[in-house]
Image (cartoon, helix red, strand yellow):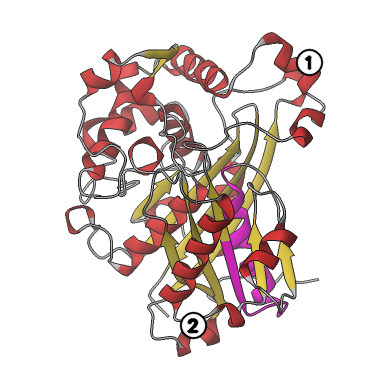
Amino acid sequence: MSKTSIRNRTAIAGAYEHPTREAPDKSTAQLHADVAKGALEDAGLSVEDVDGYFTAGPPRDVLSMADYLGLRDLSVVDDTDVGGSSYLFHVGHAAAAVAAGKCNVALVTMAGKPRTGSMGGSREDDLRPEIPFENVFGTSTVGKYALAAQRHMHEYGTTREQLAEIRVAASEHAQYNEDAMFQEPVTVEDVIESRPISEPLHLLDCCVISDGGGAVVVVDSEIAEELERDCVPVLGHGEAVRHHEGGRVDLTRTAADESGARAFKEAGVTPNDVDYASIYDSFTITVLETIEDLGFCSKGEGGEFVEDGALRAPDGELPFNTDGGGLCNNHPSNRGGMTKIIEAVRQLRGETAPEVQVPDCEIALAHGTGGGLTRMGCGTLVMGGGNV
């Protein structure tokens, strides 16, 4: 039985990032409504056009959110939740549903308020089978990523200075984003001298905590051709899940090696064809390992790769996160996958800040890492090849 490819059969017609980073006067549902409205207006569509809806995270109920948003003619819904990479999964699932004729206009929203609201998990989180065995020892998200950083340093000689280069590049880009939380450029020394959080990771190795959200609209290619807005073709999508296999975990590798390979294969391109990359940056080590696993360099060579401005736009070898990323700009609801898609769309449309716009950007990649480096879901999306 032949497989249906999404390549050039669907496109992202609308994208919107909430401008606020602190929203004490709004509920999470209101933030969802704001970004849904923004993305649909960007596409030139309305709520009445939507027949597919995808969301995850707060408020953890796709049915309630469909009701709240007034989505009355849904033929497909999906609340797949794999943490921050959920929205990369959603765009792939939406594109597949559109390509299969299950829906024509799919809305993907995310929102949350960890900065002015609650950062706590739900009671359902306490039912996860690992909780009684892991949490009793005081594990934490940053602690797990710190372990990965220590292991990468041990295995490959990666240095703190090399990790710091990732924050430096993000900060250079953030200065041109008026909505970014941290717009002041920093140096390698600033990163290394910032407050220790979990060795070897310091404060400036870690992403921001912000309220807000974002949304995208995925449509059939025939609909895209009828819209006045530049629509970005979806070329390929891949997803993968990895866990520690009862202790046989390699902390230096992520599931990006599988999700990336699947996305590149479907898109018919290679890492060498990518002009711009949105890389999930919960921590600096997340970026470094992902770059390796996506094939932009060999395993263990990420530290050397990011040196000498390789990640800086517009002329670096691999311009990344030109909005400042999760490290400097925005990490709404502690889930950075949506903003990665949005900035990649901006780059392909030529709509990001002029100072960091990649010249002749034709192929862009967006990648998300959800969960942690011991239990993760990775999603990779390849877009471009000309506007519809």
Name the residue located 60 percent from the left edge and 30 percent from the top edge: 372
Q: Nearer the viewer, residue 379 or 219?
A: 219
- Pinpoint residue 224: horizontal percent, then vertical percent: 49, 82
- Pinpoint residue 351: horizontal percent, then vertical percent: 28, 65
The picture quadrant where one finds residue 329 is top left
Tell me the crowding category of disc 1: few under 14, some 14 to 19, or many 20 or more residues within 10 angstroms, Cα based.
few
Amino acid tagged 1: Phe
Tell me the crowding category of disc 2: few under 14, some 14 to 19, or many 20 or more residues within 10 angstroms, Cα based.
many
Q: Which residue is mark 2?
A: 224
Q: Is residue 194 shown left or right of residue 233? A: left
Amino acid tagged 2: Ala
Which label was assigned to residue 133? 1
Magenta-drawn stretch contains 92: yes
Q: Which residues are magenta?
A: 84-108
- Pinpoint residue 350: horizontal percent, then vertical percent: 28, 66
Label 2: element kind: helix
Q: Alpha carbon of mark 1 to alpha carbon of mark 2: how far?
A: 49 Å
